Image (cartoon, rainbow, N blue to C red):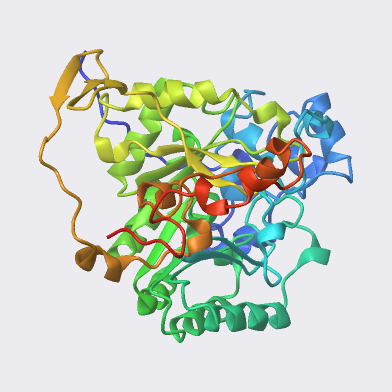
């Protein structure tokens, strides 16, 4: 069948047809005219009883939608994927098993307000609680949109001080909220302050502003951002309907400023839980020079239960992408582990079996091949690898086992449990009996 290239178009809801172009294309006008009430939405579409109930509730995440993004909604479709992402329903009021306010335990990994240090060499830096529009499945709903949770100059200085005294941090991801909603001078101050810290190599920005409000991506913004290279930016697109002519133009400006773009998608029931839809999305993204980066399982956050799918759905989608489209268009499917375990990649199983000399693999079509392993492989000498080992000992995990730094990883209380209450005696007296030679601090491998 002959494939035709999708044309990215512009849309403007009828209620906005008379707004002058200079206003419509002004990001400040878009922010000032966001929709957030029943009366606002009824100018565009007919609300359901469920939506009216949610919009009348004071217990939900803040509602604000830019006129631009609201214009992408099909007013005649109550199941429209854009609508479901930003207009609340009473399903947000329902509890579900496993629901948490801070499912990723970010606050537990926060040494100072707004800074999350979960991984060894990188941190998440939260600098605002404001977004251009609010996603109904937001991981940080406990913070975002709440004026009582805003970050101030004192918090920012504490974040910088922590970074200055923590030299293992080489990568800072700025998020929130959305950093691109900040006043230009404030954002520039944040970036300049980070660039003044010598050991910070890479700055990243996580933003949905190019999707919610592409008018914000001006020449002036791009000129400012490109002063702080290497600077990376990840956007957040969940559905092909979000890839418009305006988003294409915004991404073109950013890439011409030398800013590599990635995309993070959240798997959402009733929005993008379809393999063919996701294939269209990733192909649309690479056409506008955005690399699909992460594909997230929806988090266990309050109000997001109706968006959740089985993990198997995400694996099915990756199965439909790998081999069926360009490799660089296939994102990594991850479960952000509850309790602070971080992002765990999950994928279809392409490794069928292995022996001491070969591995058996299958491809996306079901073709099965045997791959012969080398028989004379030797590890590189330590003199070549030691200069590159900078990971913190406490966070080596399985890598520590592979490098013979320890023999096992034990659950908390493992040794005490297996003593079964017995006392220390002569057969237990020497702890070296339970350590492999060369792993403890006294015995070294020759």
Image quarter in which the N terminus is found: top left
Q: Quadrant of residue 258?
A: bottom left
Q: Quadrant of residue 278?
A: top left
Q: Residue at x 70, y 77 (%)?
A: 155
The x and y percentages for residue 268 are 58, 30
Of 367 and 32, nearer the camera is 367
Residue 68 against residue 2 in the figure, above or below:
below
The x and y percentages for residue 2 are 20, 17
Q: Quadrant of residue 419?
A: top right
- 16 sits left or right of 400 in the view: right
Q: Residue at x 30, y 49 (%)?
A: 289
The x and y percentages for residue 379 are 20, 51
Residue 375 against residue 441 in the figure, above or below:
above
- Can residue 62 be seen from the camera position used here? yes
Of 150 and 419, nearer the camera is 419
- Can residue 244 be seen from the camera position used here? no
Q: Residue at x 34, y 71 (%)?
A: 230
Residue 72 against residue 79 in the figure, above or below:
below
- 389 sits left or right of 340 in the view: left
């Amino acid at each position: 069948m002959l494939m035709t290239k999708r044309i990215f178009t512009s849309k403007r809801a009828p209620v906005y047809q008379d707004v002058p172009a200079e206003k419509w294309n002004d990001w400040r006008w878009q922010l000032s005219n966001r929709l957030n009430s029943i009366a606002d939405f009824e100018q565009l579409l007919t609300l359901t009883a469920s939506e009216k109930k949610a919009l009348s509730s004071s217990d939900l995440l803040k509602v604000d939608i830019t006129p631009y993004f609201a214009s992408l909604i099909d007013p005649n479709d109550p199941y429209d994927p854009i609508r479901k992402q930003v207009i609340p329903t009473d399903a947000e009021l329902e509890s579900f098993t496993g629901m948490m306010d801070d499912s990723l335990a970010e606050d537990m990994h926060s040494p100072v307000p707004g800074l999350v240090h979960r991984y060894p060499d990188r941190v998440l830096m939260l600098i605002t609680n404001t977004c251009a529009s609010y996603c109904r499945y937001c991981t940080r709903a406990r913070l975002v949109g709440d004026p009582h949770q805003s970050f101030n100059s004192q918090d920012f200085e504490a974040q910088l001080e922590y970074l200055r005294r923590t030299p293992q941090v080489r990568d800072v991801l700025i998020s929130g909220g959305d950093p691109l909603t900040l006043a230009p001078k404030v954002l520039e101050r944040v970036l300049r302050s980070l660039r003044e810290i010598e050991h910070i190599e890479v700055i990243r920005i996580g933003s949905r502003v190019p999707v919610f409000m592409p008018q914000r991506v001006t020449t002036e913004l791009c000129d400012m951002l490109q002063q702080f290279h290497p600077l990376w930016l990840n956007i957040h697109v969940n559905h092909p309907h979000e890839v418009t002519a305006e988003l294409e133009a915004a991404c073109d400006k950013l890439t011409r400023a030398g800013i590599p773009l990635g995309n993070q998608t959240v798997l959402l029931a009733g929005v993008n839980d379809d393999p063919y839809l996701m294939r269209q999305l990733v192909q649309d993204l690479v056409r506008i020079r955005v690399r699909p980066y992460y594909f997230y399982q929806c988090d266990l956050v309050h109000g997001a239960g109706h968006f959740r799918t089985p993990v198997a759905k995400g694996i099915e989608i990756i199965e439909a992408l790998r081999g069926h489209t360009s490799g660089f268009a296939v994102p990594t499917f991850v479960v952000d582990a509850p309790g602070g375990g971080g992002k765990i990649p999950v994928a279809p199983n392409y490794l069928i079996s292995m022996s001491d000399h070969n591995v058996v693999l299958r491809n996306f079509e079901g073709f099965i091949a045997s791959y012969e392993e080398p028989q004379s492989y030797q590890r590189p000498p330590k003199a070549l690898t030691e200069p590159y080992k900078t990971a913190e000992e406490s966070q080596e995990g399985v890598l520590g086992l592979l490098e013979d730094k320890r023999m096992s990883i034990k659950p908390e209380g493992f040794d005490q449990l297996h003593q079964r209450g017995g006392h220390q005696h002569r057969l237990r007296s020497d702890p070296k009996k339970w350590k492999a030679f060369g792993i403890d601090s006294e015995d070294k491998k020759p």
